[in-house]
Amino acid sequence: MNFTRTTFTLTLLLLILCAGLYAQSEEDQWVEEQFNQLSLDERIGQLFMIRAHSNLGPDHVAEVERQIRQYHVGGLCF
């Protein structure tokens, strides 16, 4: 009887722990959906970050915006 109870408890514990490993949060699902909608160029662009300066004026801002649109960059370094 004790062996059966111990086996059952350990099996149940193992199943509960394994279920948590495969559970996917809503945020992870949203990220996965967004990523799957990207084109190959957009996916590659997400790997890159470009340099941006907040004190170089509107011409620099326009150039950064152009690069974001053209290359689909993943982030900015200030």
Image: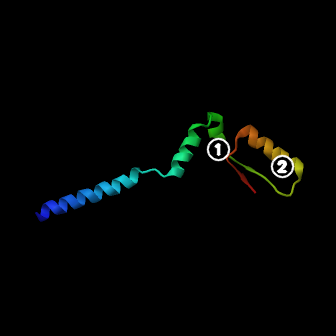
Q: Amino acid at mark 2?
A: Val
Query: Measured from the top left, where is residue 10 in percent x and y?
Result: 24, 60
The alpha-carbon separation of the residues under discs 2 and 1 comes to 20 Å
Residue at 52% over, 49% down: 28
Which of pointers 2 and 1 lies earlier in the amino acid sequence? Answer: 1
Q: Which residue appears farthest toward the front when viewing the image?
A: 26
**What kind of element bears circle 1?**
loop
Q: Residue at horizontal 75%, vertical 40%?
A: 69
Direction left: furthest residue: 1
Residue 64 image point, x, y percent: 80, 46
Q: Quadrant of the N terminus?
A: bottom left
Residue at x-position 28% and y-position 59%: 13
Q: Amino acid at mark 1?
A: Gln
**Residue 49 picture location, percent across and down:** 69, 49
Q: Residues within 10 Å of mark 1 (few under 14, many from 20)?
A: some
Q: Quadrant of residue 5?
A: bottom left
Spot the residue most to the bottom. 2
Of residues 3 and 47, the one nearer the viewer is 3
**Is 24 placed left or right of 72 in the picture?**
left
Identify the element where label 2 is drawn: helix
* Residue corresponding to mark 2: 61
Q: Are marks 2 and 1 in contact (CB under 8 Å)?
A: no
Q: Residue at x 34, y 57 (%)?
A: 17
In the rendered structure, the answer to whether residue 24 lies left or right of residue 34 reads left
Label 2: few (<14), some (14–19) or many (≥20) C-alpha neighbours in 10 Å: some
Viewer-closest of 71 and 12: 12
Residue position for label 1 = 46
Q: Is residue 65 found left or right of 31 in the rendered image? A: right
- Residue 14, how many percent across, how many down? 29, 57
Q: Quarter of the image containing the C terminus? A: bottom right
